[in-house]
Image: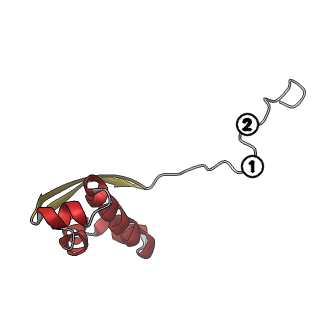
Amino acid sequence: LHAAIVVTYHVTDPVDYLVWNHDADNSVDEIVAACVQQIVKTQPWPEVRQMELGDLLRETAGLLLQDFGIDVEAVSVRSLAPAKVFHLVGDVAAAPLSDDEE
């Protein structure tokens, strides 16, 4: 999945933001990405494309981030597209093919 998402938020409680987050700067990214992943994994792709994802992500991520002193004001989904990923299994340092093997 390839997604370009802009999240507008502000910190409501600096203590919660800094103390309860292992990496405060990445918290928003990770939680929004987890919310997108959950939506995409549980819904058919045609339905996902028709959803108002920005509003849905603002609500779901907003609830999760509230405990960390973050208020999500808006989420804008700029692009969302399926991506094919190839994963090499086995010996990735294989020798190149010889002329006889090509």
Residue at horizontal 33 percent and vertical 68 percent from the top? 35
Q: Name above or below for residue 28 compared with residue 91.
A: below
Quadrant of the drawing holding the N terminus = bottom left
Residue at horizontal 40 percent and vertical 66 percent from the top? 37
Density class for disc 2 (Cα within 10 Å; few <14, some 14-19, many ≥20) is: few
Q: Amino acid at mark 2?
A: Ala
State if disc 2 and disc 1 touch (CB < 8 Å): no
Quadrant of the drawing holding the C terminus = top right
Give the quadrant of residue 101. Answer: top right
Secondary structure under badge 1?
loop
Give the x, y percent position of residue 95: 80, 32
Q: Amino acid at mark 1?
A: Gly
Give the x, y percent position of residue 14: 12, 61
Give the x, y percent position of residue 33: 35, 61
Give the quadrant of residue 100. Answer: top right
Q: Is residue 39 left or right of residue 11?
A: right
Q: Which mark is residue 90?
A: 1
Q: Nearer the viewer, residue 24 or 85?
A: 24
Residue located beneath label 2 in the image: 93
Give the quadrant of residue 30. Answer: bottom left
Residue at horizontal 9 percent and vertical 65 percent from the top? 12
Q: Is residue 80 left or right of residue 8?
A: right
Which residue is the extreme one toward the right? 100
Q: Nearer the viewer, residue 79 or 26?
A: 26
Q: Nearer the viewer, residue 41 or 81?
A: 41
Here the colouring is secondary structure
Q: Is residue 84 left or right of residue 100?
A: left
Give the x, y percent position of residue 91: 75, 44
Q: CA distance from mark 1 to mark 2?
A: 9 Å
